[in-house]
């Protein structure tokens, strides 16, 4: 089925390198979300995109984090100059407008050495 | 500001017994409330939601939840637990005036055979 697809599923990088995580939402879903799940923690909101509106970036933890969504579809979360505390699972979710339900991908596990 | 509290890190219950996973919330407007389940190494799956209407909502896999406005709670329940229900459960809230979903820290449910 055409669920939310995230890549890579696993990424190991060295401290100081930049990484890009990709999310391909369900076709037709207008809303797209990024969350971070650290070991033993809940889901930390990072950013969401809703249609053509300006994204809500209020959850991005520092200016090393950025995200874009091209053509209202695919989104890329970029982390510059990675730090060890960035190690986590990054989850993407999409939602059709109005239903309230989020559809999650299986996540990208980032390990910063 | 929106917030969600899941006061129990872990809940243990014997198979066949009823289970309850607690959630309380805080929002400034009308709450949209959700429960999600996460199985090991998987993304989150939607269980049920409360938007408006009956305070008792029924969802997937025999789960239900009761919305209590006066206590600002939305506890997840199931009359008879299965070993296969063992997983991590997240409560989430969305203020009706925004598209931002805030998740709790999660409760690990362990059903013992």
Image: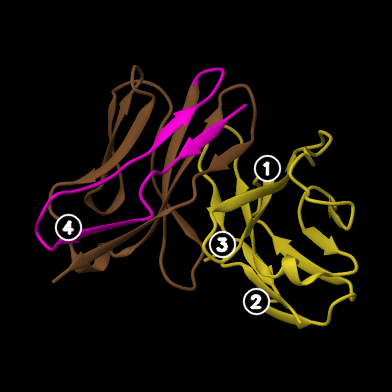
Chain under callout 4: B
Chain under callout 1: A
- First-in-chain label (2 vs 1): 2
Label 3 in the same subunit as label 1: yes
Q: Residue at x 72, y 79 (%)?
A: A11
Q: Is residue B112 above or below residue A31?
A: below
* Left or right, B95 with reference to B82: right
Indicate whether residue B6 is drawn in magenta: yes
Q: Is residue B106 above or below residue B43?
A: above
Crowding at dot 4, Cα within 10 Å, few <14 / some 14-19 / many 20+, comes out as: many
Nearest the viewer among A107 and A24 is A107
Label 3 in the same subunit as label 2: yes
Separation (CA) of disc 3 from disc 1? 14 Å
Residue A99 visible in rendering? no
Q: Residue at x 53, y 53 (%)?
A: A42
Q: Chain A takes which shade in the image?
A: yellow
Which part of the image, by quadrant, shows the C terminus of chain A? bottom right
Q: Which mark is residue A9?
A: 2
Location of residue B71 in the rendering, given as x and y in whole percent from the top left corner: 34, 22
The residue beneath circle 4 is B81
Number of numbered callouts drawn: 4
Location of residue B113 in the rendering, given as x and y in whole percent from the top left corner: 13, 72
Label 2–label 1 contact, CB within 8 A: no
The residue beneath circle 1 is A31
For label 3, the SS is: loop
Chain under callout 2: A
Crowding at dot 1, Cα within 10 Å, few <14 / some 14-19 / many 20+, comes out as: many
Label 3 in the same subunit as label 4: no
Residue A98 lies in quadrant: top right
Residues drawn in magenta: B1-30
Separation (CA) of disc 2 from disc 1? 22 Å
């Amino acid at each position: 089925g055409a669920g939310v697809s995230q890549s890579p599923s696993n990424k190991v990088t060295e401290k100081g390198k930049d990484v890009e995580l990709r999310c391909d939402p369900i076709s037709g879903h207008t809303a797209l979300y990024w969350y971070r799940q650290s070991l033993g923690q809940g889901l930390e909101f990072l950013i969401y995109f809703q249609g053509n509106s300006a994204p809500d970036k209020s959850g991005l933890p520092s200016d090393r984090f950025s995200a874009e969504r091209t053509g209202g579809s695919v989104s890329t979360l970029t982390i510059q100059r990675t730090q060890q505390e960035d190690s986590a699972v990054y989850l993407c979710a999409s939602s059709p407008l109005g239903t309230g339900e989020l559809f999650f991908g299986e996540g990208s596990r980032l390990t910063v050495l | 500001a929106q917030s969600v509290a899941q006061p129990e890190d872990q809940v243990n219950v014997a198979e066949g017994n009823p289970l309850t996973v607690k959630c309380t919330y805080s929002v400034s407007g009308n709450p949209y409330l959700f429960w999600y389940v996460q199985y090991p190494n998987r993304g989150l799956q939607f269980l049920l939601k409360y938007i408006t209407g009956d305070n008792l909502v029924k969802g997937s896999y025999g789960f239900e939840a009761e919305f209590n406005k006066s206590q600002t709670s939305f506890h997840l329940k199931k009359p008879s637990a299965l070993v296969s229900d063992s997983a991590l459960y997240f409560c989430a809230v969305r203020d009706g005036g925004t598209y931002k979903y805030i998740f709790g820290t999660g409760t690990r449910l362990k059903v013992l055979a």
